[in-house]
Image (cartoon, coloured by chain):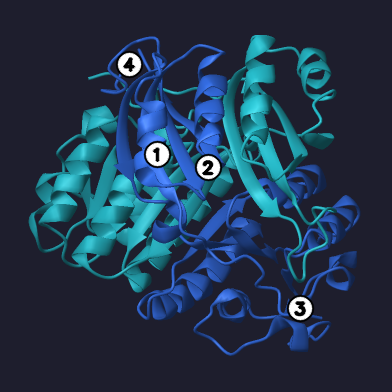
Chain colours: A cyan, B blue
Amino acid sequence: MPRRNPQPLPPAIAARLEVADDPRALGAIATAVGTVGGRIRTLATVRRGGLAGTAAPSAPDAVEVELEVEDAVEEAILAALGPLEEVHSIRLTRPLAKVFGKRVIVVGGGAQVAQVALGAVTEADRHNLRGERISVDTIPLVGEDNIAYAVRAVADLQRARMLVLAGSIMGGDISKAAEELRAVGIPIIALNMAGSITDHVDLVVSDPVQAGTMAVMAIADTATFDLAKQRGRRY
Amino acid sequence: MPRRNPQPLPPAIAARLEVADDPRALGAIATAVGTVGGRIRTLATVRRGGLAGTAAPSAPDAVEVELEVEDAVEEAILAALGPLEEVHSIRLTRPLAKVFGKRVIVVGGGAQVAQVALGAVTEADRHNLRGERISVDTIPLVGEDNIAYAVRAVADLQRARMLVLAGSIMGGDISKAAEELRAVGIPIIALNMAGSITDHVDLVVSDPVQAGTMAVMAIADTATFDLAKQRGRRY
């Protein structure tokens, strides 16, 4: 099995646009970007206008949109978007992959999620000091349905490279969701726990701090830990 | 000052599309969604085809795209996208706001980020048990430039509602970035630390576990903690 680190972070152009909150606006923007050969990787509304307590966007019927584009020249994108009446303003930003990088996702019970995070953040610190960008994103949840939804939704998160399941009992639909997630190329580390989940993950680790540490090592280009060689093992 | 909890999570339609990786594809999709009155909130490439170790997308020249749309009827969106030749397949998913919810972002030094995360995850657990959805997303970073970039980039993150700065000395461009972030409506809690940053945040907290706890309380609808009433205080 090849090493599961398949998606390098490509160079991209990033910009924050203030845009008319009209259903046709994003179609016009996406079409203009495509016309100059750009591939849109992200088009996401990050703020809406007219909201109490916010200072932006300036117009009440506007939204702020984060745009990331590959395979295009910055000047061409700006020239394509500038004349659109739907686009009120454009400001270049930095692609999120360069700022927050690859993501380890940790899902499960609060006490254990926190301990996995401790290991993962500490290990990510050591790699980020050497030029990596790895972030550790967590959510404490209870219940088979909620956790299974979260496992499936990891496939919808940009830059997610690894899931750690941190709990004391997981199985049933969570195990099904785990297999679905692995099938799209995102590996899973689980704590050693009750339930069927430990038969449906890449690696089982008893200590949560070590589980977090190994999760980061497995996706860090600056580490020599190869999850493929550890597959099916328990620590 | 109004309570800084300005953006409720609206109902949305979410789908994962397998799409031809052609610069014109997303323009066609965005235009089709707009034609039936939908407002695209997210259009994000989550996977590319032909990658070693991944099982999806099925075609080497395809990408998987997560689409979230508001103000539209599900059937109308499916009817608009189904006939497009750029769209190979459509599968309904769950909007990320319903799975991962509001985000507390924690940035700074590894040891302190981990302790803030411990407090924030533990507190989020208590609120998520009562129906909230709050996640805690972290990155350990070193250096004024890197941290200032991350602070500014929080404005580009969907569903980010709070930043915690967890370090021992921060100032200069980080303080400038902090004011910019607050100006777009995202409040900041900082640990008590050296440097000018503590004059440019909403709240200063000495204990990292308490800082994480308060960050979650401030954005939880199930809590009575009002950051506006605490503004400028130090604990």
Residue at horizontal 53 percent and vertical 47 percent from the top:
A135
Residue at image mark 4: B52
Residue B110 position, x and y percent, is 59, 57
The answer for which chain carries disc 4 is B
Of the residues shown, which amino acid type is indicated by label 4? Ala
Residues at marks 4 and 3 on the same chain: yes
Dot 1 corresponds to which residue? Answer: B76
Q: Quadrant of residue A134?
A: top right
Q: Quadrant of residue A146?
A: bottom left
Name the element at disc 2.
loop
**CB under 8 Å between callouts 4 and 3?**
no
Distance from the alpha carbon under mark 2 to that under mark 4: 35 Å
Label disc, if present, on residue B204 of the rendered structure: 3
Residue A132, visible in the rendered structure? no
User: In the rendered structure, are the residues bearing label 1 and label 4 in contact, judged by CB atoms less than 8 Å apart?
Assistant: no
Q: Quadrant of the N terminus of chain B?
A: bottom right
Mark 3 or 1: the one toward you: 1
Residue B60 percent across, percent down from the top left: 35, 10
In this orientation, which residue lies closer to the viewer: A125 or A180?
A180
